[in-house]
Image (cartoon, rainbow, N blue to C red):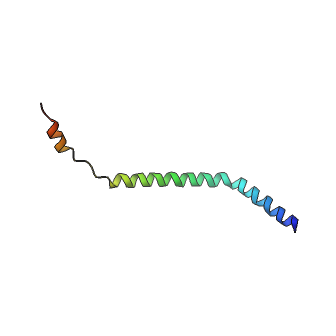
Amino acid sequence: MTYDVAGFVLAAAAAVRVFAPDVAAVLRRLLGAGVRVGAATLMEQQRPADHSSALNEGDSR
């Protein structure tokens, strides 16, 4: 029974060591995509500033 537990622990450690870089890369890509989507959403929500009145007031030639 002890060998089964030790074998399971070794197999789990090997699996973590093998797949951890791939999982980290996928999470990094998902985080980057989430940031891009969030930034795009924030840019869509912003209203364009009305600069026409500011330009007319500041134009004193």
Residue 31, percent from left and from top: 52, 53
Rendered residue at 72%/53% (across/down): 17
Rendered residue at 14%/39% (across/down): 57
Q: Is residue 33 above or below residue 57?
A: below
Q: In the visual, does 53 lie left or right of 32?
A: left
Most extreme residue toward the bottom is 1
For residue 12, what is the image quadrant? bottom right
Rendered residue at 76%/57% (across/down): 13
Q: In the visual, does 33 lie left or right of 50?
A: right
Residue 15, percent from left and from top: 73, 58
Q: Is residue 26 above or below residue 56?
A: below
Residue 42, percent from left and from top: 37, 53
For residue 27, what is the image quadrant? bottom right
Rendered residue at 15%/35% (across/down): 59
Question: In front: 18, or 8?
Answer: 8
Name the quadrant of the N terminus.
bottom right
Q: In the visual, does 59 lie left or right of 15?
A: left
Name the quadrant of the C terminus.
top left
How many tags in the picture? 0
Most extreme residue toward the left is 61
